[in-house]
Image: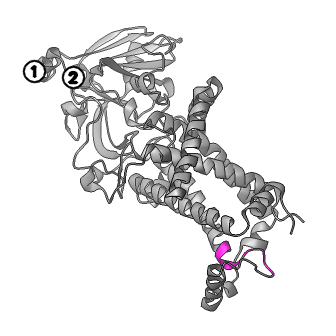
Amino acid sequence: MKRRAFVSGVGALLVSACSKVADTKAGASLLSAADGWHKKAQRALSGRTALAREYEKSDISPFFRGNGSLSVDSDAYRAQADKGFAGWRLNVSGLVKRPLSLELDDIRALPQRSQITRHDCVEGWSAIGEWTGPQMSSILEKSGLLPEAQFILFLCADTLDGARYYESIDLDDAMHPQTIIAHSLNGQPLPVINGAPLRMRIERQLGYKQAKYLTGIEAVASLDSIAGGKGGYWEDRAGYQWYAGI
Amino acid sequence: MKRHLLSTRLWHWINAFSVIVLFMSGLNISNAHRYLYWGQWGFAPEQAWLAVPKFPGWMTIPGHYSLADARDWHVFMVWPFALGLLFMWASMLLSRHFWRDLRTSPKEWRATAIWHDVVQHLQLNFDHEGSKYNFLQKLAYGAVLGVLLPGMVITGLAISPGFEPAAPWLVDSLGGRQSARSIHFLFAWGTCGFFIIHIVLVLISGPIRQIRDMITGGRL
């Protein structure tokens, strides 16, 4: 018992020392600087356009787990769902030459990409599914990015704990061939738990980047003045790394 | 001649600190999803081969559940850990420490020789003439330096979705991402097992001298 108390004492000491370091400004900025090193290291290793692994149909998991928001708690959303999202719009705005407002039929009429990929949640689990939709690059080319644009922001219909969900990526990921706006999972319209009617797929990053219930994409020059300023719901709320490749 | 080279001593303490922080922040990350799977995918208890217990606050960094902070610590400390390991292997090969002290000879793998070492260990007789380390020590250090620690780096990389495009074959050769995650967990506990035995043996073989020598270098 004494030894156990000693071990837990040493453990607690290290834990509190670590929280002291993390609480200091220098400690916190060092820890968050690592975020940038990982992005640079990974992009240097594989190249900015390297593809995430794609699987065979037989690898698809029997169910695709939903996590975070499992629906949108509003009458407007429920009314949309009843009509098969016939009136849903995806607005393309911000630093673009031609703002767009696309219906689901417009999105289905664009050139499509299907990809069977693995979704890795930050918590540790994985599921495999086939996603279909237009590449984000084709939509951005249609609307024409202005030279000041640095990031693409995803605007969502869902709220978690009272705050609107949002996410963002840089232009490398926005123009990546596997970055698609998915309207289908395994050949069927997206289920509500997986983000109906539209969600993002950014295949080289973790699940919290894959914004669901997508209502808009906005090109911006900086993330600083948006919501909590860290570029995403979980980044603002819990301090998750903005670069979610690790 | 020093008992421990400067490179060994430097690496030993950087590695010890990194491994402890990685292990404790890893336990916090484990609390986020306490199921382990084999293969590429897995997301629910019924697919799991192991339901992992929830680790209490005194075992985790930070001391309360925070996946974001634990990940910050984990992916930060992996840099000194992985680069340190690379440095240690380079210096062990260059200084011939590996060939001279850690490599085993076929003679040592004979059952009678192994039995002799086990008996000596159990009698707490740690004197070994001739070579610097006895067979069991070589085996333990070889397993840690050659398998467990590099295995942690390799399986850790294989879990990372941003690394996978650089080497998808790595994930496949480990049996899939969830298998890599399971092996990462098993190797972490293997390393923890080595750590406990290592501390116990230091404590019963003259801890003051052992720790002093690992700081100053000591004398042969």
Is B198 one of the magenta-colored residues? no
Look at label 1 and name its amino acid: Lys
| Above or below, comparing residue A87 to residue B146 in the picture | above
User: What residue is rendered at 26% in x and 41% in y?
Assistant: A65
User: What residue is rendered at 46% in x and 60% in y?
Assistant: B186
Q: Which mark is residue A83?
A: 1
| Above or below, comparing residue B47 to residue A210 in the picture | below
Q: Residue A37, how many percent across, how many down?
A: 61, 34
Q: Nearer the viewer, residue A88 or A33?
A: A33
Q: Nearer the viewer, residue A173 or B7?
A: B7
Q: Residue A207, how many percent across, how many down?
A: 37, 35
Report the span colored magenta: B130-137
User: What residue is rendered at 54% in x and 43% in y?
Assistant: A12
Residue B11 relative to residue A226: left or right: right
Whole-number angstrom distance, CA of label 1 to CA of label 2:
15 Å
The secondary element bearing badge 1 is classed as loop
Q: Which mark is residue A72?
A: 2
Is B133 one of the magenta-colored residues? yes
Mark 1 crowd level (few <14, some 14–19, many ≥20, 10 Å Cα): few
The secondary element bearing badge 2 is classed as loop
Instruction: Residue lying at the far front in this picture: please name it.
Output: A2
Q: Residue B50, how many percent across, how many down?
A: 34, 58
* Chain containing the residue with disc 2: A
Look at label 2 and name its amino acid: Val
User: What residue is rendered at 25% in x and 29% in y?
Assistant: A195
Can the viewer see residue A31 in this picture?
A: no
Q: Nearer the viewer, residue A120 or A115?
A: A120
